[in-house]
């Protein structure tokens, strides 16, 4: 039984950390059991809520202020999904001249526009929508609020 | 006569699967780099081995330049600029993550996935030929869309043929990356096999090719038409299985995971040669620690440890290739025992000789707890959980933050891996995330 203590102490991978305290609690069989134990299903796991598909989700970091109007600041992280099909209004990572660039995708009657959310940057009209390469579609922005 | 095709206890095919799909990523390392750096599309890219030594991956554009596999980088470097060739160090963290994503995705298309290597897997699949071709295209598109790397898919009745079909899918434009072997008319299949040398075949090495050629077996078709029993008698049962697989009889069973992996190797070359026994001891300590962590991760214990070192092929003076093979006192993953065993190499190190590579190999692996030793012989270090403790410390504070013996000493000789042309570890390190432009 000596090995059990090893496993509980450090052997669990990070992904099961949320249920870890319950295991410890249960092995100590003394006293009145905490009534809250029946209701403990593990802590909130952000991965579960922010990552819809682990195979296609990536985190990227924004460099520049051209998307300020969409609430995306310089240095923010975006959670992006490569498997999503972007729609009109989606924040996308487009491939422009071999570079990855954040823009808002606008699908208008007149054609496709890559729009910056900052008046200092001009819109880019995409003449041939078929040639536009979208690397990923952004789902969430991580923005540090600390002053 | 009847030939026993496979061990009767191991199913040649998974129950309920008609076909085997072989999926592998084209120029895997280079494709993983391109997935995060679109400016690498369409230009020649090579990825270099440990220590920026030799070419281990070439894109089609690099192959077209005539760059051979395994070419030492120092020979290419002077011409790289004029070719527009981009060379990158091996970004193992990135490739490992991309590989895991591909394998996870493949698991959605079959309940039977055998991960064969970092960039290839076998899947048990079933359906009609039309469905097989469609499935191949679906898998190819999904991997591209989700992970961003190109794959080819070969589907056939046997593993060997699935691998061959994949090769055809890769090299023959007409297949557009997906080849279902049995959909090809038989005379066309024979024609394709007659144009491929036996050396192209899975598991047929150059030396074997020479012996086969001497018997008049030159093409894959020749081998397919050979008598399997004669092949077994003259060569091996392994090659006989290859012949049977070519004929369409499945002989190489699907394995869910290769738990039976019988060895782990930790080896690399050094950026600066190691010239003293003390420095070699430090190297061995680090490898022992890595081996221990890997064994623990896979729930394995080793019975034998082999440690080796070598001087450069390019330097013909003071040639030295010491090695030791140490039977461990009991099956173990304990870093202390592995460390002790690995360090016995130091006695065979000549002071002043320039060793450019070293490594350890642990063999005779078995699952932990398969047979528990008597309490008396239980290793005290193992009981105290030193291995797991060290693992969790290095996970939290980074590699090199904790070490046993001389591996714990910081700032020793500079033998660690040189990766001068390393791309960011985009998916595993928060400080190295992919930058996207908003300007």
Image: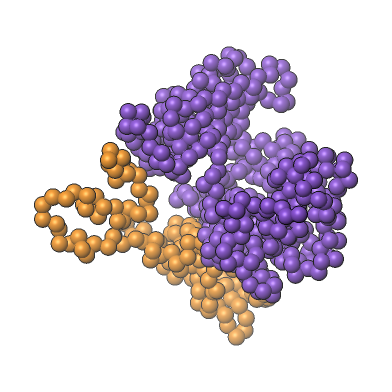
Chain colours: A orange, B purple
Could you say where residue B33 lies in the image, as x and y percent from the top left? 61, 52
Q: Is residue B102 left or right of B289 when viewed as pictured?
A: right
Q: Residue furthest left?
A: A31
Could you say where residue B54 lies in the image, as x and y percent from the top left? 69, 38
Q: Is residue B61 above or below residue A52?
A: above
Residue located at (56% from left, 58% from top): B113
Write down the quadrant of residue A69 in the picture: bottom left
* Quadrant in the picture for the N terminus of chain A: top left
Q: Residue furthest top?
A: B351
Count every numbered label the image shows and give the total.
0
Could you say where residue B98 lies in the image, as x and y percent from the top left? 55, 54
Q: Is residue B224 left or right of B136 when viewed as pictured?
A: right
Q: Is residue B78 above or below residue B439?
A: above
In the depicted view, which residue is nearer to us: B76 or A132? B76
Residue located at (61% from left, 31% from top): B269
* Quadrant in the picture for the C terminus of chain A: bottom left
Q: Is residue B279 left or right of B62 when viewed as pictured?
A: left
Could you say where residue B48 lies in the image, as x and y percent from the top left? 66, 41
Q: Is residue B317 above or below residue B118?
A: above
In the depicted view, which residue is nearer to us: B310 or B274? B310
In the depicted view, which residue is nearer to us: B388 or B237? B237
Visible in this render: residue B410?
A: no
Residue located at (55% from left, 28% from top): B306
Visible in this render: residue B305?
A: yes
Residue located at (46% from left, 44% from top): B298
Write down the quadrant of residue B177 in the picture: bottom right
């Amino acid at each position: 039984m000596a090995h059990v203590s090893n496993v509980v102490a450090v052997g669990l991978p990070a992904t099961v950390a949320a249920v870890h305290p319950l295991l410890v609690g249960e092995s100590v069989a003394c006293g009145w059991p905490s009534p809250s134990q029946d209701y403990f299903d593990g802590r909130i796991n952000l991965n579960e809520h922010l990552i819809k598909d682990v195979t296609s989700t990536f985190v990227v970091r924004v460099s520049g202020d051209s998307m300020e109007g969409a609430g995306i600041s310089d240095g923010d992280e975006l959670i992006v999904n490569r498997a999503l099909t972007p729609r009109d209004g989606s924040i996308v990572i487009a491939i422009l001249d071999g570079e990855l660039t954040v823009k808002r995708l606008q699908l208008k009657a007149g054609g496709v526009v890559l729009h910056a959310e900052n008046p200092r940057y001009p819109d880019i009209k995409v003449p041939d929508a078929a040639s536009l390469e979208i690397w990923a579609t952004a789902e969430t922005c991580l923005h540090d609020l600390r002053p | 006569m009847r030939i026993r095709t496979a061990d009767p206890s191991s199913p040649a095919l998974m129950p309920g699967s008609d076909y085997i799909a072989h999926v592998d990523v084209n120029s895997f390392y280079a494709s993983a780099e391109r997935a995060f750096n679109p400016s690498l599309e369409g230009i020649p890219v090579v990825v270099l081995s440990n220590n920026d030594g030799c070419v281990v991956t070439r894109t089609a554009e690099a192959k077209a330049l005539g760059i051979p596999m395994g070419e030492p980088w120092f020979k290419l470097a002077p011409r790289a600029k004029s070719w527009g060739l981009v060379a990158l160090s091996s970004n193992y963290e990135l490739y490992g993550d991309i590989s895991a994503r591909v394998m996870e995705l493949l698991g959605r298309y079959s309940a039977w996935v055998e991960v064969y290597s970092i960039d290839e897997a076998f899947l048990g699949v079933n359906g009609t030929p039309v469905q097989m071709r469609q499935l191949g295209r679906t898998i190819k598109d999904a991997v591209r869309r989700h992970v961003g790397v190109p794959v080819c898919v070969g589907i056939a009745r046997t593993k060997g043929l699935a691998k061959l079909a994949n090769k055809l899918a890769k090299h023959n434009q007409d297949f557009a990356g997906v080849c279902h072997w049995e959909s090809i008319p038989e005379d066309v299949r024979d024609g394709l096999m007659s144009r491929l040398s036996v050396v192209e075949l899975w598991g047929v090495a150059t030396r074997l090719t020479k012996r086969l050629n001497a018997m008049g077996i030159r093409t894959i078709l020749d081998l397919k038409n050979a008598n399997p029993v004669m092949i077994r008698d003259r060569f091996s049962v392994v090659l006989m299985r290859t012949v049977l697989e070519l004929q369409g009889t499945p002989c190489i069973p699907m394995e869910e995971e290769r738990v039976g992996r019988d060895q782990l190797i930790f080896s690399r070359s050094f950026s600066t040669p190691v010239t003293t026994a003390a420095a070699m001891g430090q190297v061995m300590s680090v490898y022992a620690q890595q081996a221990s962590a890997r064994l623990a991760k896979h729930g394995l214990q080793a019975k034998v440890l082999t440690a080796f070192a070598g001087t450069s092929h390019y330097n013909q003076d003071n040639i030295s290739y010491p090695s030791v093979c140490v039977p461990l006192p009991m099956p173990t993953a304990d870093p202390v025992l592995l460390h002790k065993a690995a360090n016995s190499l130091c006695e065979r190190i000549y002071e002043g000789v320039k060793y450019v590579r070293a490594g350890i190999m642990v063999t005779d692996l078995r699952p932990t707890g398969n047979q528990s030793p008597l309490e008396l012989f239980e290793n005290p270090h193992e009981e105290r959980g030193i291995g797991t403790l060290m693992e969790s410390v290095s996970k939290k504070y980074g590699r090199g933050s904790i070490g046993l013996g001389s591996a714990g000493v910081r700032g020793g000789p500079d033998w660690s891996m040189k990766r001068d042309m390393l791309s960011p570890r985009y998916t595993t390190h928060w400080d190295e995330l992919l930058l996207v432009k908003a300007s």
